[in-house]
Image (cartoon, rainbow, N blue to C red):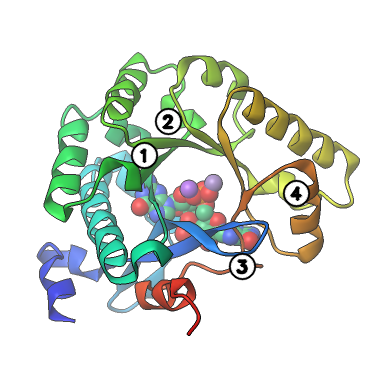
Amino acid sequence: GSSRELSRPSGSSRQLFLLYQPIVRLDDGRTAATEALVRWRHPSRGVVPPLEFIPAAEQTGLIVPLGRWVLREACRQQATWLRDLGTAAPQSVSVNVAGRQLTDPQFVADVVAALDDAGLDARHLTLEVTETAVLDSAEAVATLEALRGLRVKLALDDFGTAASSLGLLLTCPVTSLKLDRTFVAGITTVARQEAVATAVIRMAQALDLAAVAEGIETQEQARMLRHLGYRFGQGYLYARPLPPDEVAAMSAPAL
Ligand code: G
Ligand code: G
Ligand code: NA
Ligand code: MN
């Protein structure tokens, strides 16, 4: 609609849009939250996946304005769902944040402005940071502390793939972990993957952190994760990244 067009910045970023992948409760498959994932509709190349432009945006610094747009758009969409769907709405929107954004001195102010302009309470926003983004950066950790002060939730994304995952749990004030999908892929057939997934959920429970298992593609994986104690998951078994109207259709209570 026209209001969606107006909320986009002028110029090439009019070609950016967001899809939202549900994060579901593993017991009943209902959508608890969503993760915003950016897409670029290129005039001649079609839809370009983020892996083909996010790394370049990080290198050039363009990730800062791009990420600011993603944050504002996702907060606006979350506020719309809460208004339109009431208690059936997903309760939080997750936004991926690059390391470069965390060390930008304006970042905390940008988050406050995005929440204010959307009329969204901070408890409905989760920022996903990767282990490498916060590695060895006192600046990034200070930013995370300030964000927790605002009561924004923080997820450690792709958990388990970096060299110092455990050390980060001591220094970063995160509220949830996302078990990387490489540990989910072989969980029903590879004993070592089951062992790692088990260790991660026990640690999350001991630290009072929520845990989300990523990349669930089969019922067998979902069953195993539930058995191990995971309560939340994400993956193609439940839903691919979807346009906002399809998220609303999935979330609306049955008539
Ligand atoms: O959307 P897809 O599942 O193809 O995502 C590929 C990668 O791009 C993932 O690592 C995801 O976290 C990242 N990504 C998607 N959207 C954003 C975004 O808005 N900001 C940043 N920094 N990374 C994103
Ligand atoms: O790094 P991050 O966790 O943000 O990556 C999100 C990426 O994972 C997106 O590219 C998304 O399309 C992809 N993804 C989401 N669910 C699945 C899944 O079930 N299987 C696989 N292989 N990829 C998935
Ligand atoms: Na993510
Ligand atoms: Mn991830």
Q: CA distance from mark 1 to mark 4?
A: 28 Å
- Name the secondary structure under disc 2: helix
Is 228 rendered above or below residue 174? below
Based on the displayed image, in which of its 4 quarters is residue 8 positioned?
bottom left
Compared across the picture, whether 64 is left or right of 109 comes to: right
Q: Nearer the viewer, mark 4 or mark 2?
A: 4
Please give the name of the residue rendered at 38% of the width and 43% of the height, measured from the top-left corner: 126
- Name the secondary structure under disc 4: helix
Compared across the picture, whether 142 is left or right of 234 comes to: left
**Badge 3 density bin: few <14, some 14–19, many ≥20, Cα 10 Å:** many
Reading the image, the residue beneath label 4 is 225
Of residues 160 and 118, the one drawn nearer to the viewer in this rendering: 118
Based on the displayed image, in which of its 4 quarters is residue 108 positioned?
top left
Question: Which amino acid type is marked by label 3?
Answer: Tyr
- Name the secondary structure under disc 3: loop
- Name the secondary structure under disc 1: loop
Reading the image, the residue beneath label 1 is 98
Is 49 rendered above or below residue 204? below
Q: Are marks 4 and 2 in contact (CB under 8 Å)?
A: no
Residue 41 seen in the current view: yes
Q: CA distance from mark 2 to mark 3?
A: 28 Å
Give how far across and how far down residue 17 sits, in percent: 30, 67
Q: Are marks 1 and 2 in contact (CB under 8 Å)?
A: yes
The number of callouts visible is 4
Q: CA distance from mark 1 to mark 2?
A: 6 Å
> Does label 1 or label 2 sit earlier along the sequence?
1
Reading the image, the residue beneath label 3 is 238
Reading the image, the residue beneath label 2 is 133
Give how far across and how far down residue 189 sits, in percent: 89, 51
Please give the name of the residue rendered at 33% of the width and 65% of the height, measured from the top-left corner: 86
CB at mark 4 closer than 8 A to ligand 2? no
